[in-house]
Amino acid sequence: MQNDTTIRVYRYRLYPTKPQEAAMFETLRLTRTLYNAGLEQRIAAYRKQGKTVTAYDQQKELTALKAECPEFNAVYSHVLQDALDRLDKAYKGFFARVKRGDKAG
């Protein structure tokens, strides 16, 4: 059976205002900070306790993070959850390559 579905792609150029551009860069900075902090948390937990931290474990802590660091309140929770999901995907990919014997990097 042949699939004759046509997929259309639309591309739009964004021209954000200066405040919008600043907000996007701030969101990017905060998600990068969260990603790196999540990575550090996983490494530290494994080194100290031999324990693996999952994305779900880290996402449960986002409410406390927003209470401690109010700058994260400006970022939608789904965006923060996605940063931790991407970290989890990278972690799983890394260990899958190690298990297969491929170059892990």
Image: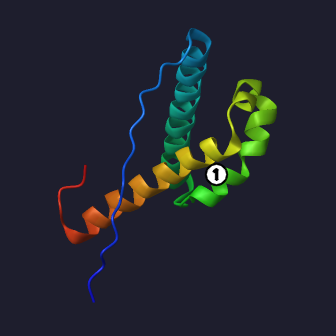
The disc labelled 1 sits on which kind of residue? Gln
Identify the residue position indicated by label 1 in the image.
58
Q: Secondary structure at mark 1?
A: helix
| Residue that protrudes farthest toward the top in the picture | 18
Q: Answer above or below: position of 48 versus 29.
A: below
Q: How is the image coloured?
A: rainbow
Q: Answer above or below: position of 76 versus 15.
A: below
Instruction: Return the x and y of residue 24 as percentages of the image width and height.
Output: 56, 24
Question: Residue 5's quadrant in the figure?
Answer: bottom left
Other residues around mark 1 within 10 Å, as few (<14) / some (14–19) / many (≥20): some
Instruction: Return the x and y of residue 32 as percentages of the image width and height.
Output: 50, 32
Task: Tell me what residue is drawn at x 26 percent, y 63 percent.
Answer: 97
Report whether 88 appears left or right of 90: right
Instruction: Return the x and y of residue 39 as percentages of the image width and height.
Output: 49, 44
Residue 47 visible in the snapshot = no
Q: Answer above or below: position of 54 versus 45.
A: below
Report whether 33 appears left or right of 75: left
Task: Tell me what residue is drawn at x 69 percent, y 43 percent.
Answer: 77
The residue lying toward the viewer, choosing from 100 and 5, is: 5
The residue lying toward the viewer, choosing from 24 and 62, is: 24
Report whether 1 appears left or right of 38: left
The residue lying toward the viewer, choosing from 8 and 31, is: 8
The residue lying toward the viewer, choosing from 44 and 85, is: 85
On the rendered image, what quadrant is the N terminus found in? Answer: bottom left
Q: Answer above or below: position of 3 versus 49.
A: below
Question: Residue 49's quadrant in the figure?
Answer: bottom right
| Residue that protrudes farthest toward the bottom in the picture | 1
Task: Tell me what residue is drawn at x 54 percent, y 44 percent.
Answer: 83
Residue 51 visible in the snapshot = yes
